[in-house]
Amino acid sequence: MAKEFRTLKTSVNLPYELAYGPIWTRFFDGLLNKKILGTKCPKCDRILVPARSFCPRCFVDTPEWVEISHEGALTAWCLTNYRYYGQPVEPPSISALIRLDGANVDFLHLIGGFDLGDFELVRRKVKNGMRVKAVWNEERKAQIFDIKYFEPV
Amino acid sequence: MGNPVAIIGIGQTEHGKRMDVAYPELVREAVVRVYEDAGLEPDDIEGIVSGTMPSMMEGVALTHFYLADAMASKGKTILKTETCGSTGMSLAHTAYYWVSSGIADLVMAVGHEKMNEGDSQATMTTVGDPFYQRYFISGAPGVFSMQSQMWSVRYGLAEEKIRDAAAFISLTHHDSAFDNPYAHIKKRLTAEEIKTARIITYPVRLWDVCPNSDGACAVIFASQKMVKKLGIKKAAWVKGVGFSGEEQFFGDSDKAVWQSAVLAVRQAYSQAGIKNPLKELDVAEVYNPFTFQEMMFYECFGFCELGEAPDMVLRGSFTRNGDLPCDPSGGTLCTNPIGATGLIRTAEAALQVMGKAGDHQIPGAKLALSHAMGGIDQFNGIMIVGSEL
Ligand SMILES: [Zn+2]
């Protein structure tokens, strides 16, 4: 580049108020009370978590509520070791898919509660299929971080 | 399939960190080149389809309005298509459907992005809903790393072997980028450097992941009637297209054998009459922002059996001298202006079958596959092009 050209520093910051609707309201009220709630599809019998108002495959209403176990098995994981604007947790962190006992889909959240500083130790400790259990935040606000993370049992 | 459609012109910018130009100037660079390449004027075109990844990548919500002049769109029908990372492929599909339907004879698709002007990974997390998923997808690398990790465990693939195969892919693509005048990252690497580079999202390390690129790509699609009328000799005919999507929740479907990739390619193969892709295809431009994920695509596309990709990679089956050369352009791994990237895959496939790929030409290529994927592990799209109608 022969010449440095000017740049404009700007930002977009907009407020929103998003409706939860009745099903997600009930799911997040559940978290407030340390309950993980799912719904069951009457057609394919799958138990979906987080709870849905309808089954995305069968496209029918799922009115039956099921309380889901706080424990499950790890399906997949990935350690995040970089930063981006608005990141909710300090890196390193581990995002994970967890098959909660009794559910038919994987639940996306974090695993933690152990030292993530030494990657080689992490790699030796974290295995697909390992048992994990929800750790609850003391202060809950009816949001997804009411579960702090899932820790190895 | 509808009426026959051909690609008759391609324009790309030099991709990279392009703070030397404003966004409309960058887009115009590709548009000027596509008209030069096709020997046409903006007045000849009936419709334009434009797209980015999330528009907010550059902080302007409706980019097709902002970029209207750069695409010479005054007085023309203009559409916007967005399917996240697969936007570029969906642009090609939209232009194809438009011409194939018989409604228009000449349509231009333009994909564009300036990833260096914002925080690309923060922008990408806004693809996830703010109730459940946004906080855990870690930009793009997070979900795709989890997917690769799931795949490697499913097929009992030794970590060391996959690591070696991923390094092989990274090294050969970065080498290939030197032969592509438009590629962004051109770097000679060693396997050791790649394998010990900084972890981004384990198992993905620095040289396993694509860069943030600024760039644009424009492609002109024409009807058979127009190809004849213009007397065009070198065209890339669309032989098959496929697209498939999955549920919104990342945990709802199995990603180790990615069903949307399998279904999209099956649809395209059926249209193109392809039974044995490894034998029949001459080259493939697989959307490969992550080395590990590229191997999953080889399997989903039937280039090899499930769980077999790392061995095939290490045998050199997918290099430029291999059975089925994949990403001779250096691929997404070396160049990723994301709204343009899928369209660049189709453009590169077209260049190959037209014999216009220059230093990265696969000799005698007649049938080429192009691919893109996007969403929170959600969408896959395919377009197959050939040198003959
Ligand atoms: Zn169902």
Image: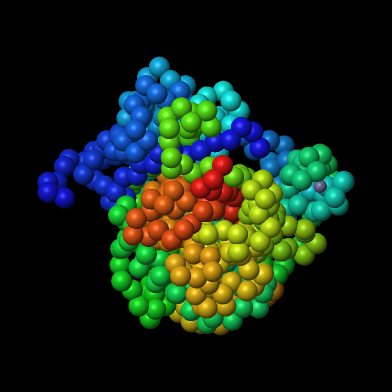
> Residue visible at 68% across and 35% down?
A21
Residue B19 sits in quarter: top left
Q: Is B183 positioned to the left or the right of B137 in the image?
A: left
Apparent side of residue A126 relative to residue B196 in the rendered image (left or right): right
Q: Position of residue B148 (x, y in %)?
A: 57, 66
Residue B5's x, y, as percent?
A: 54, 36
Q: Is residue A138 above or below residue B215?
A: below
Does any portion of residue A12 appear in the rendered image?
Answer: no
Question: B261 or B269: which is nearer to us?
Answer: B269
Q: Residue at x 53, y 72 (%)?
A: B317
Most foreground residue, B260 or A32: B260
- For the C terminus of chain A, the quadrant is bottom right
Q: How many marks?
A: 0
B3 shown above or below B380 = above
Q: Looking at the image, which is closer to me, B282 or B183? A: B282
Q: Residue at x 31, y 36 (%)?
A: B36
Q: Position of residue B41 (x, y in %)?
A: 34, 26
Task: Confirm whether residue B365 shows in the render.
Answer: yes
Q: Position of residue B213 (x, y in %)?
A: 35, 51
Could you tell whether B94 is left or right of A51 in the image?
left
Specify whether A59 is left or right of B330: right
Image point (54%, 45%), residue name: B388
